[in-house]
Structure formats: C-alpha cells, structure tokens
Image (spheres, grey):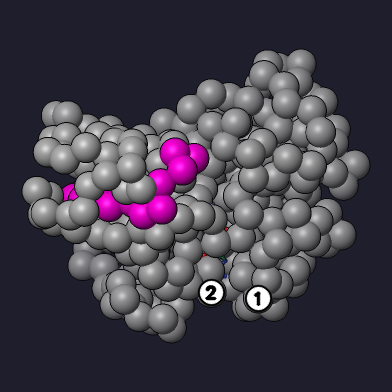
Amino acid sequence: MKLLKSSPQNIKIAAALIKAGGTVAFPTETVYGLGADGFNPAACARIFEIKGRPRFDPLILHAASLKQALRLFRRVPAPALRLMKKFWPGPLTLVLPKSAAVPDIVTAGLATVAVRVPANPAALALIKAAGRPIAAPSANKFGRLSPTTAAHVKKQLASGPDMILDGGKTAIGVESTIVTFCKGHPVLLRPGGLPLEELEKVSGRTSLARSPDSNAPAAPGCLKKHYAPAVRLKIISPGQAVNAGRSAAYLAFSDAPAGKFRAVETLSCRGDLREAAAGLFSALHRLENSGAKIIYAEKVPPHGLGRAIMDRLRRASA
Ligand code: TXA
Ligand code: MG
C-alpha cells in the first residue's frame, strides 16, 4: 500500500488504479473515503472486505458534477434538484430512486441510491480522471471512528487499499448530511456537515427519519453503535463532576476540565461549532490512543453542526 501526496501526478496514478478495479482512499471535505469504481461490482466488493462492512449497508456514489450525478438517478423531484444546485459540491448526500446504471452491490439491493458531489479539489480531480462515479464509504473499519487525516486511514486500514492519497486534514470533519424524499417531502436520514438550518432555508421544514436513540436505522448504516472509539465513551454535561485520574480522558467543548486526566482535548476554545466538528474525530483518535479506559465527552449545543457532533457522540457512547 502506497501513501502519496495528492499531487496531479499521483491523482493520475490513483485514477488508473480505480479504472483497473483497485481501491484508493482519498480526501473529501468531510472525511476520507475508501473509493472504488462505482460501476464495477467486484471492485465495490473489495470495499466491503477491507472495511469489514456488512453487505446490507449501502455505499455513497461520488460524482464530479451535477450532470454525472443525475445519470445515477431514475427520477429527481424538483425540490431535490434545488438542493443539488444550491449545495453541490458540498457535504450533502441525496438518496433517490436509482437508475439501471447503478449496480446492486452499491445500494445493497435497495431501489434507491445515495449520491453526492464532494467539495474537495483532489476528490473532484480523481473522479474526473477516473471518468466514472466513485463508490466510497468513510475509510475506517466498520463501526469505528471516521478518518480526517491520511494517518487515521493508515492506522485502521494498514494493508487495505492499494493507495492512500494524502490531502491533509479534511475541512469539515464530520460526514455529509443525508436527505431523502418521501412523497415529495424532505426527510433527514443523517445529520452531518451541512447544518439542518441551512438545508431548511432551501428545502423548507424537513422531518427527522428517526429519534436519535432509536435502534431501527433509517439509513441502513445508521446503527445505534457507530463512529465508536475503541474505549468506552460517556456523554456528560459541561462542568459535571466525574472521576478524574490516570484512567480517564476528557473531551471538552470549550473550557478545560478542573480535575487531572490522562489526556484532555478541547474542541474549540471560542465555542465555535465549525471548529469543533473539524477537530472532533482527530481529538477522539488521540484520546483513544492515550491509553485511558474511559472518555468523558461533554455535550455541545445541539444546533448547527452541533447536531452532527451530538449524533456521533451518542453513537460512540452506545
Ligand atoms: O461525508 C460522507 O458522506 C463520507 C465521505 C467519504 O463522502 N461518506 C460516508 O459514507 O460517510 P458511509 O458509507 O460511511 O456512510 C453512508 C451512509 C450509511 O449509513 C449508509 O447506510 C447510508 O449512507 N446510505 C447509503 N445508501 C443509502 C440508501 N440507498 N438509503 C439509505 N441510506 C443509505
Ligand atoms: Mg462511515
């Protein structure tokens, strides 16, 4: 496995690997993806193997343009098209009826497909050079923390992909917001990098597919336990008294905790939710590596990107 900077030359090599049925981990603006040719079922099967991901959990197809994305859908309701035009490229995934071009392994047999156009120059250049949509889940082992750096990918998938394209730290840091339409009405399947407030400015009132604690996933991959570090995580209120000491780590939102902990990470001293989201998974990776037996994670304000952060913390703690 090669780890290479995302230079134009290396993007060409990566695209050739994709065309030849290989797998490449690459940066997007949300998290790193583990990519393969979205029209090649055998290549997509490798993704499931490398991740240890169950086959019932469908993949997202990444397109380089609206035009390329539209060919993957059978039908696009007008309000969905408005969202695509407004937010692509960007951290929004749309789930709509699939066209015949999409192989069943990508959708895990569902009649719908998840598609997005990522806002990352290396990702867009790779998809363009490959000349086909790239199927890519987050480049982590199934159920574990998502990667926001190439080093995170290497740590979890050391001997997996044929190549890792290193494009530095991802800008947004949490996965895309996933939206579907039910009888013409928008439904949120996963809170993510596009805040619900921004989405609703265009889509109008958007219903939530499930209660955050429900174990019945609306998106098949939205299992209650997911995005989890290898150690126990407990959600607490800011300032709540906890057992400090060498075996505990602490994830603070804006103010460092009082007690002495094995490791402490503060997401944003300014209390900025964008900054907090961008650093969330990196902070969790470091706390996971610290050797602590438990991570105490403070609640963050549940609006804007705070909704996606709380969703990931709840799943990590399940
Ligand atoms: O930001 C992101 O979305 C990242 C980057 C790499 O693009 N990708 C990502 O993929 O988070 P993944 O596979 O880790 O999460 C995709 C989620 C899964 O929970 C899956 O179940 C859901 O999307 N999904 C995919 N296709 C679906 C479909 N047809 N219907 C409902 N949910 C679907
Ligand atoms: Mg994932």
User: Where in the figure is residue 198, as x and y percent of width and height?
Assistant: 24, 49
Tell me which residue sits at (17%, 35%) in the image. 256
The circle drawn on residue 180 is: none
Give whichever of 82, 302 is nearer the camera.
302
Q: Secondary structure at mark 1?
A: loop
Q: Which residue is mark 2?
A: 220
Tell me which residue sits at (48%, 72%) in the image. 223
148 to 307, vertically: above or below? above
Indicate the amino acid at tag 2.
Pro
Ligand 1 occupies quarter: bottom right
Looking at the image, tell me whether mark 2 or mark 1 is earlier in sequence order.
Answer: 1
Tell me which residue sits at (33%, 36%) in the image. 263
| Label 1 CB less than 8 angstroms from ligand 1 | no
Is residue 94 visible in the rendered image? The answer is yes
Q: Residues within 10 Å of mark 2 (few under 14, many from 20)?
A: few
Q: Secondary structure at mark 2?
A: loop
In the rendered image, residue 298 lying in the magenta stretch gets the answer yes
User: Where in the figure is residue 161, as x and y percent of width and height?
Assistant: 77, 42
| Label 2 CB less than 8 angstroms from ligand 1 | yes
Q: Which residue is mark 1?
A: 56
Give the quadrant of the C terminus: bottom left
Start-end of magenta stretch? 289-302
Give whichever of 106, 251 is nearer the camera.
251
User: Where in the figure is residue 192, as x and y percent of width and height?
Assistant: 37, 53
Using residue 156 as the reference point, say whether residue 248 is left or right of it: left
In the rendered image, residue 168 lying in the magenta stretch gets the answer no
85 to 236, vertically: above or below? above
Q: Residues within 10 Å of mark 1 (few under 14, many from 20)?
A: some
Indicate the amino acid at tag 1.
Phe
Labelled pair 2, 1 in contact (Cβ < 8 Å) = yes
